[in-house]
Image: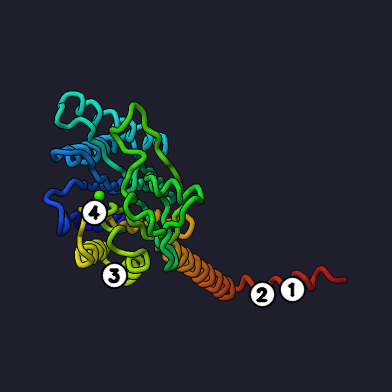
């Protein structure tokens, strides 16, 4: 998907991978709103759930843009209820659910919300940081310090979700807000990427490939090259900070314009003073001043 020039440059793609027959992932790249959803459920119901979630978010965008973090939480709860309502109407879709990881840009801030094990990362000054904690059995144990993230004993249960949109009567959403700095880059992805490609290789691609669409495509290619065991979805977001905000890329240019205007003003002032002085001198206005002073002396 081509980049949006004003709020962010974005690259996004999804791929079935090399093992699964269907792609149950979905994504949304509608600046200022970005999302990745990874559906679960039999008989292709996972695909229905993930599509329902991103469609509900897209429809909520007008209220999200002004509602900030509360609007985002309401939109996710709405998506949860929409999935449950659909599952009640269609017995074949019973038990379906979806993860959802969201990034919403608002001025010089980014709101992050997630449910499940789709992740949001931030690349800042060359360092890749995972901003979300997986809602999986393993992820919860890692968060509580009961298990190391790379413990091989956990490999069989890494994808067991403890939270998903559509699962259970109510839903708890994790929310966070971060300040944006110039050149921050965000990655939203499904577990089909992180299960196949280690974080250091993800970081190397995000650092080395400046075009966000090419970066997204490279990450999907890397996951497929490593086996492509699951559906893979990647959204790469390069926010464009508003002019005058902290750390904005536009700031040096703004300063330059101000400096140019100031020096132009000073030059004009200087020219005006010189012209005025010459004019007065030619008209003889300067001559009487010393004599006037002298005449006041006793
Ligand atoms: Ca998955």
State which mark lies toward you, 4 or 3: 4
Instruction: Measure the C-alpha gap from mark 1 to mark 4.
Output: 88 Å
Instruction: Measure the C-alpha gap from mark 4 to mark 3.
Output: 17 Å
Give how far across and how far down residue 37 sits, in percent.
26, 45
Q: 151 or 72, which lies in front? A: 151
Decide: few, some or many residues near mark 4? Use Cα within 10 Å; few <14, some 14-19, many ≥20.
Answer: many
Q: Residue at x 49, y 56 (%)?
A: 246
Instruction: Measure the C-alpha gap from mark 3 to mark 1.
Output: 76 Å
SS for callout 2: loop
For label 1, the residue is 291
Q: Residue at x 43, y 49 (%)?
A: 109
Contact, CB < 8 Å: mark 1 with mark 2? yes
Please identify the quarter of the rendering in which residue 116 is found.
top left
**Comes first in the chain, label 2 or label 4:** 4
For label 4, the residue is 233
For label 3, the residue is 209
**Comes first in the chain, label 4 or label 3:** 3
For label 2, the residue is 287
Decide: few, some or many residues near mark 3? Use Cα within 10 Å; few <14, some 14-19, many ≥20.
Answer: few
**Comes first in the chain, label 3 or label 1:** 3
Q: 67 or 279, which lies in front? A: 67
State which mark lies toward you, 3 or 1: 3
Decide: few, some or many residues near mark 2? Use Cα within 10 Å; few <14, some 14-19, many ≥20.
Answer: few
**Comes first in the chain, label 2 or label 3:** 3
Instruction: Measure the C-alpha gap from mark 2 to mark 4.
Output: 83 Å
């Amino acid at each position: 998907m081509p980049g949006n020039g004003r709020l962010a440059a974005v690259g996004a793609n999804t791929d079935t991978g090399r093992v699964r027959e269907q792609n149950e992932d979905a994504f949304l790249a509608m600046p200022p709103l970005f999302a990745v959803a990874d559906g679960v459920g039999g008989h292709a119901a996972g695909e229905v759930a993930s599509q329902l979630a991103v469609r509900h978010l897209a429809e909520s965008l007008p209220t999200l843009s002004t509602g900030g973090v509360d609007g985002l939480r309401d939109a996710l709860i709405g998506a949860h209820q929409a999935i449950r309502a659909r599952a009640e109407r269609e017995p074949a879709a019973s038990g379906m659910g979806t993860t959802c990881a969201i990034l919403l840009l608002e001025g010089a801030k980014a709101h992050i919300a997630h449910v499940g094990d789709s992740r949001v990362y931030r690349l800042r000054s060359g360092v890749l940081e995972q901003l979300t904690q997986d809602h999986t059995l393993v992820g919860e144990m890692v968060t509580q310090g009961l298990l190391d993230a790379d413990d091989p004993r956990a490999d069989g249960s890494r994808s067991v979700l403890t939270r998903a949109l559509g699962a259970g009567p109510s839903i708890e959403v994790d929310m966070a807000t971060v300040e944006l700095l110039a050149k921050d880059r965000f990655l939203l992805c499904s577990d089909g990427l992180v299960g196949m490609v280690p974080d250091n290789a993800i970081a190397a691609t995000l650092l080395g490939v400046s075009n966000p669409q090419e970066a997204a495509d490279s990450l999907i290619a890397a996951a497929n090259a490593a086996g492509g065991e699951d559906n893979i979805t990647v959204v790469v977001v390069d926010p464009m900070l508003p002019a005058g905000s902290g750390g904005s890329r536009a700031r040096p240019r703004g300063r330059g314009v101000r400096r140019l205007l100031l020096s132009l003003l000073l030059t004009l002032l200087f020219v005006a003073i010189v012209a005025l002085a010459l004019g007065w001198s030619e008209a003889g206005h300067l001559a009487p001043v010393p004599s006037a002073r002298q005449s006041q002396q006793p």
